[in-house]
């Protein structure tokens, strides 16, 4: 037995140490031996992915800064259903707010089997801010509101094919799909310990900013006013001529900027899921860049330019037009079947002589030279415009397996060759721009969220013909308008143009009734500022009226006369006086 | 000796208390700043949303159909002819 205070003190010390030892042992076990296991468990309990609401996508503006595509803040609504106290009442209150049938909502909100874990179910997507506010005012903690965005098309269906859309999986059409990597904003997401209200703990916040990066804004080359006017003219033309569709392109030949491009049929981009549900995906294809057609006589401009530029035919060159030419097993006739006697390059354009064009390609140029020019004008290859789904068209070359000798003759007047309306407009723009063919552009500049502005420079596609050839051909086209195409003449302005009427290929031949009428031209001459191409598909008018000159030329006239005014281009006499 | 030890102990306690106070102040300040930062970032996101909503509303009000409707209501008509006056340099 121990006696005395010292002994008792020692005993107490020993007892305390003995009591502390298991605690120390446990500490070592928890903090050292099993540290990583408990660390993981703790992190699993408090760690969550956290971020700020996603940043908006970049907006799209026209060349003057007017908004074409913006963003509207909306909310996705969900419910933690095992926290609901009165499901019947909740369903009846939410049904009108969420625009869902009450029975359907009741089924969604009802917990089918008892569970300890939180059951979350989505109720509806993309409700506007006003509805979200009403839901907040209900004070129901089990309702979850996730902020998100909806694309807003300020002008409705206007320029729908150009603007396009992108679905949830990043697929889409138009400039939005093409420029998706710039338009889409970046969300900053991290994983770390969060507090009870799921906001990150202070230590986490000090690491780095969570502010998301908004997408890059795009300023397009489109002029909203010209676009709206062109769409109105196209709609009216389709009604007047009972056409199945059509395209009008307005571009600046000097820079390649597309000022307006309208196509029918069109669609409302924000309703794209509805079109997809109905299986109408084909409506999304842009006829201006994705659907090739046989250009018809507009192509004679290319043939005449090639013949003149090659030096094989000048303004004194003539041939005897007998109204018929046999070549490669094909019998080429003029559209009216008539013989025109001695004709030159001007006559071929004035009277749109198929025999003359075929004479140039088969007897003056030959296949190698003719197709060298066809390729130089960009046919059979994409133009590189920043739109999805651009088609290259179809050009049969002598080296192709499906080549037929008759192609050389028929291609010269735009038959047996398929081009997109944009390719045709770009080729004509080379004639308007001193022989220089500019790459068509739809994006003028990118405006980054940090304030940087990156202009997209104009780019030359090539020089298919010399400046001299371009001037001569432009002069011939202008002369042709003055002499023959009264419907295309613009009071006060000298314009150049060429009409086309193309049959529509079917299996084993051509549709005997249906045609595509077109007119391509530019103005004013000299020093053209704008190129206009008009295409109308399958006009339902009497047969004698079914010609590009009767249908497309007046539409061209209507467009170019207004566009020249909207662009502030003075009449030719004022320009001459300057 | 004992007085010296007592002073030393007191000194250690005081220094520890001061350091602990400074540490707590810095930590509290950090927490406060982080919380404020989070609030401000949230505010910024909310302002961004409001801004985008307002931009869309402005675009709606200045869209071509709305402008046309307002122009017609104000009595404007499309220009039918334009006269250019060329003033030569003196």
Image (cartoon, coloured by chain):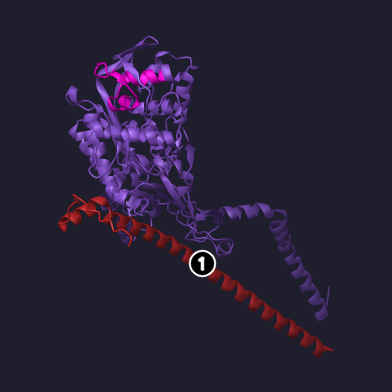
Tell me the residue that label 1 is attached to: B37
Quarter residue A294 falls in: top left
Direction bottom: furthest residue: B3
Task: Assess whether residue A91 is covered by the magenta stretch.
Answer: no
Does A387 sit left or right of A47 as displayed? left
Direction top: furthest residue: A329
Residue A476, image x and y in percent?
Answer: 33, 32
Does A337 sit left or right of A369 as displayed? left
Nearest the eye: A406 or A284: A406
Whether residue A534 is visible: no
**Chain letter, disc 1 residue:** B
Whether residue A18 is visible: yes
Quadrant in the picture for the N terminus of chain A: bottom right
Residue A39, image x and y in percent?
Answer: 64, 55
Label 1 element class: helix
Nearest the eye: A445 or A141: A445
Residue B90, image x and y in percent?
Answer: 32, 62
Above or below: residue A206 compared with residue A144: below
Q: Residues within 10 Å of mark 1 (few under 14, many from 20)?
A: some
Q: Residue at x 74, y 85 (%)?
A: B11
Task: Assess whether residue A335 is covered by the magenta stretch.
Answer: yes
Nearest the eye: A341 or B51: A341
Above or below: residue B36 compared with residue A489: below
Q: Residue at x 38, y 30 (%)?
A: A420
How many numbered circles are shown? Answer: 1
Above or below: residue A113 compared with residue A54: above
Chain B drawn colour: red
Residue A27, image x and y in percent?
Answer: 70, 61
Chain A drawn colour: purple
Does A71 sit left or right of A511 as displayed? right
Q: Which residues are magenta?
A: A334-361
């Amino acid at each position: 037995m121990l006696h005395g205070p010292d002994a008792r003190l020692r005993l107490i010390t020993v007892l305390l140490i003995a009591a502390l030892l298991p605690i120390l042992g446990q500490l070592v076990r928890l903090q050292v031996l099993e540290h990583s296991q408990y660390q993981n468990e703790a992190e699993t309990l408090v760690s969550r992915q956290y971020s700020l609401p996603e940043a908006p996508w970049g907006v799209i503006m026209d060349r003057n800064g007017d908004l074409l595509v913006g963003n509207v803040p909306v909310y996705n609504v969900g419910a933690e259903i095992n926290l609901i106290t009165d499901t019947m009442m909740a369903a009846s209150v939410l049904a009108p707010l969420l625009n869902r049938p009450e029975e359907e909502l009741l089924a969604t909100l009802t917990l089918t089997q008892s569970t300890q874990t939180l059951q979350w179910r989505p109720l509806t997507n993309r409700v506007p801010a006003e509805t979200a506010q009403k839901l907040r005012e209900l004070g129901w903690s089990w309702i979850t509101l996730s902020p998100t965005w909806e694309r807003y098309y300020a002008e409705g269906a206007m320029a729908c094919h150009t603007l396009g859309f992108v679905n949830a999986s990043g697929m889409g059409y138009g400039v939005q799909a093409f420029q998706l990597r710039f338009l889409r904003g970046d969300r900053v997401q991290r994983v770390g310990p969060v507090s009870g209200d799921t906001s990150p703990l202070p230590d986490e916040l000090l690491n780095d900013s969570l502010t998301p990066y908004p997408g890059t804004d795009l300023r397009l080359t489109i002029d909203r006013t010209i676009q709206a006017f062109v769409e109105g003219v196209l709609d009216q033309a389709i009604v007047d001529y009972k056409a199945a569709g059509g395209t009008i392109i307005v571009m600046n030949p000097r820079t390649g900027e597309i000022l307006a491009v309208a196509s029918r049929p069109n669609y409302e981009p924000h309703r794209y899921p509805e079109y997809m549900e109905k299986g109408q995906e084909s409506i999304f294809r842009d006829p201006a860049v994705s659907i090739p057609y046989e250009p018809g006589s507009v192509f004679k401009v290319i043939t005449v330019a090639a013949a003149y530029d090659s030096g094989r035919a000048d303004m004194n060159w003539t041939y005897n037009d007998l109204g018929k030419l046999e070549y490669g097993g094909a019998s080429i006739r003029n559209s009216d079947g008539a013989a025109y006697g001695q004709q030159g390059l001007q006559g071929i354009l004035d009277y749109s002589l198929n025999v003359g064009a075929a004479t140039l390609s088969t007897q003056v140029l030959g296949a190698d030279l003719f197709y060298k020019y066809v390729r130089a004008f960009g046919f059979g290859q994409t133009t590189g415009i920043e739109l999805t789904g651009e088609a290259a068209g179809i050009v049969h070359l002598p080296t192709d397996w499906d080549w037929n000798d008759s192609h050389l003759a028929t291609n010269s007047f735009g038959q047996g060759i398929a081009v997109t309306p944009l390719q045709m407009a770009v080729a004509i723009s080379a004639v308007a721009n001193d022989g220089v063919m500019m790459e068509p552009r739809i994006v003028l500049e990118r405006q980054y969220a940090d304030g940087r502005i990156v202009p997209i420079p104009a780019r030359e596609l090539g020089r298919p013909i010399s400046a001299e050839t371009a001037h001569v051909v432009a002069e011939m086209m202008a002369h042709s308008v003055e002499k023959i195409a009264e419907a295309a003449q613009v009071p006060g302005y000298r314009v150049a143009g060429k009409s086309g009427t193309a049959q529509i290929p079917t299996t084993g031949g051509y549709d005997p009734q249906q045609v595509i009428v077109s007119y391509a031209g530019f103005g004013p001459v000299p020093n053209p500022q704008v190129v206009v191409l008009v295409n109308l598909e399958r006009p339902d008018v009497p047969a004698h009226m079914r010609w590009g000159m009767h249908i497309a030329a007046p539409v061209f006239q209507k467009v170019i006369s207004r566009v020249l005014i909207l662009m502030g281009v003075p009449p030719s006499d004022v320009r001459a006086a300057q | 000796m004992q007085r010296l030890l007592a002073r030393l102990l007191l000194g250690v306690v005081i220094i520890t208390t001061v350091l602990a106070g400074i540490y707590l102040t810095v930590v509290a300040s950090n927490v406060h700043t982080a919380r404020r930062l989070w609030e401000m970032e949230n505010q910024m996101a909310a302002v961004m949303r409001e801004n985008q909503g307002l931009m869309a509303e402005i675009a709606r009000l200045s869209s071509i159909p709305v402008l046309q409707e307002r122009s017609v209501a104000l009595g404007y008509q499309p220009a039918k002819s334009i006269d250019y006056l060329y003033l030569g340099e003196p």
